Image (tube, helix red, strand yellow):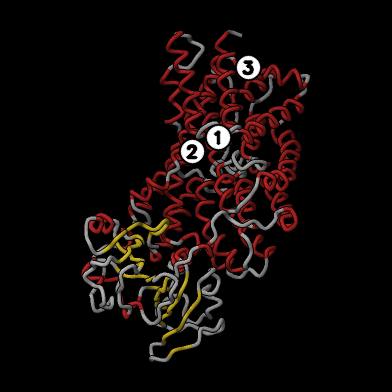
Amino acid sequence: MGWEAWYALAVAIGLLTSLAFRAAATDLLAVAALALLVLAQNLSGSALLPTTPEALSGFGSQGLVTVALLFVVVTGLELTGGTTLATGWLLVKSKNLTDAQMRLLLPVAFLSAFMNNTPVVAAMMPVVGDLSKQLRISVSRLLLPLSYATILGGMATLLGTSTNLIVRDLYQGQLNLLSEGQELAELGFFAPAWVGLPAALLGLAYMMSCSTWLLPERKPAVSLGDDPRQYTVELQVEADGPLVGKTIEEAGLRRLPGLYIAEIQRESGEIAPAKPQERLRANDVLILVGALDSVVDLRKIRGLATPDEQSRKLDVPVWRRTLVEAVVSSRCSLLGKTIREGQFRSRYNAAVVAVARGEKRLSGKIGDVRLESGDMLLLEASPSFLHRQRGARDFYLTSSVEKGEVRRHDRAWLALLITALLVLAASFNVLSILTASMLAALAMIAARCCTSDEARRSIDWSVLIVIGAAIGIGSALHKSGAAEMVADVLLGFAGGNLMLSLAAVYLATALCTELITNNAAAVLMFSIGWQTADKLDVSPLPFVIVVMIAASASFLTPFGYQTNTMVYAAGGYSFRDYFVFGLPLSLIVFVVTMVVVPWVWL
């Protein structure tokens, strides 16, 4: 092999090593490795290294664009409450940890088979948080199983993971390069299900039976109980909403930590006791007290609205509103006046959702609170409120609330319909996955399930950068002959045995996945798997499936798969938790793959 092969291999190994030791951000390291390859080609002019257009071609791949569009689709689901609407009715009936895991993991695994894993976990994390509060258990009992369940479910279809999309894109590219007379089977939408379905069923059974004693209780880095502010919030039960006739317990109003109902004011004027079995009536006004995070979660519950039509009278459409915190200054013109007397909504075009005065509990309705300097107000307003008030004297400080977008519950069913049409169109080949995802993303924005700004913010650009750079690096490994060299080494260890070669490719891919990321590992190992099949003079399809499955089967570290990283801090996990809980799962997937792939594709 020429120096180009050794150089490309050295760059790839350097990338793996630097990513394993977290030398810098993943996307920065991937781009740096790609830049080294482009630089070498430009200086040497070698035809065995990718040119600049070839190195950058990955950023225009269909798989990468599809992943970006799926982030937008799930954002539409989250902001309309579609995810909660689809799963809440099932999860609210959970009685204990095992029951909750069964109700959570089975639907999530099924859902992730038809949607990209990363946005599914992002959409479900708030639901899991609510479920853990309901059962009064640590989120560590649910978040890691949630991540693993999406990985397992995602193995079953081409749409399930970004890895599958990327590998399918690479496979299609190789089919287009075949000469006349050479034919290979197309990679069908459900082709990975031969391995993914049994692996998912066995993996879910393992998690539900063993997580109780393999996953300890972990406290997240930041607890909701750490917030000393006690907001008083006033909400009204919508007359035609789903909460009418439900008890306080059934409505989920006692499950948020640090939040309690101070009183219930009936439409008749009576004050009802806030007992767990007290049934809610139409137009009941609830006075609640709790921490900011719990107040934000409270606003996600369908059937509750700001009373007196205050938020509905705002001169801002719901899809453009967000939650804002503002501290009343000593020069505020409304000092000493109640919120109602001062006509707060008309003056500022913002509705007061809740009020906090240090650790003091405020009584009565929000409109009757007399404003004092230092009061913290939680407002429902447009983002422009922040810009208008920064130079004004009425408030010391204004800031947007993280994840404070106002839910558009009236569009939840529409968001679910758009997502269902996406899944059906892609599943039955009515449209390509890319086309269906593009139409679904545009429909979410057009229907105001999310705005264009929210859509842009939802996209995890670091994930896309890693995918695009990894495709360029994989191209360099193939073009320089490095992939063929590695394939020869693997065949040497396997002694030319087909089964041992499949196992060697699987284990090498799984190791790369744990050290770097699933997408990078898939792209790097695809060329190696293809070359190995070529050396053995067999169909490359079983090796493609092995790479696809192994690249997704990341259960041993927090950094091999995006969803594992997402739940790492939120669940308060340690590296040991991933290894202890994930090792049996890795073995299950490996054994299933080694049994099924030869049976189906050889």
Q: Say which of marks 3 and 2 sits in front.
A: 2
Residue tagged 1:
519
Horizontal placement of 377 versus 510: left or right? left
Q: Could you tell me if residue 433 is visible in this image?
A: yes
Amino acid type, callout 2: Val
In terms of sequence position, does the residue under pointer 1 or pointer 2 come before the other?
A: 2
Label 1 packing within 10 angstroms: few (<14), some (14-19), many (20+): many
Percent x, y of residue 487: 67, 19
Percent x, y of residue 307: 35, 77
Q: In which quadrant of the rendered image does the N terminus lie?
A: top right
Q: Say which of marks 1 and 2 sits in front.
A: 2
Q: In which quadrant of the rendered image does the C terminus lie?
A: top right
Residue tagged 3:
484
C-alpha gap between disc 3 and disc 1? 20 Å
The reply to whether callout 1 and callout 2 are in contact (CB within 8 Å) is yes
Horizontal placement of 45 versus 329: left or right? right
Q: Quadrant of residue 485?
A: top right
Q: Secondary structure at mark 3?
A: helix
Q: Secondary structure at mark 1?
A: helix
| Label number found at residue 463 | 2
In terms of sequence position, does the residue under pointer 3 or pointer 1 come before the other?
A: 3
* Residue furthest front in the image: 330
Q: Could you tell me if residue 106 is visible in this image?
A: no
Looking at the picture, tell me which residue is in the foreground, 566 or 100. Answer: 566
Amino acid type, callout 1: Asn
Amino acid type, callout 3: Glu
Looking at the picture, tell me which residue is in the foreground, 74 or 236. Answer: 236
Image point 46% across, 33% down: which residue?
Answer: 465
Label 3 packing within 10 angstroms: few (<14), some (14-19), many (20+): many
Label 2 packing within 10 angstroms: few (<14), some (14-19), many (20+): some
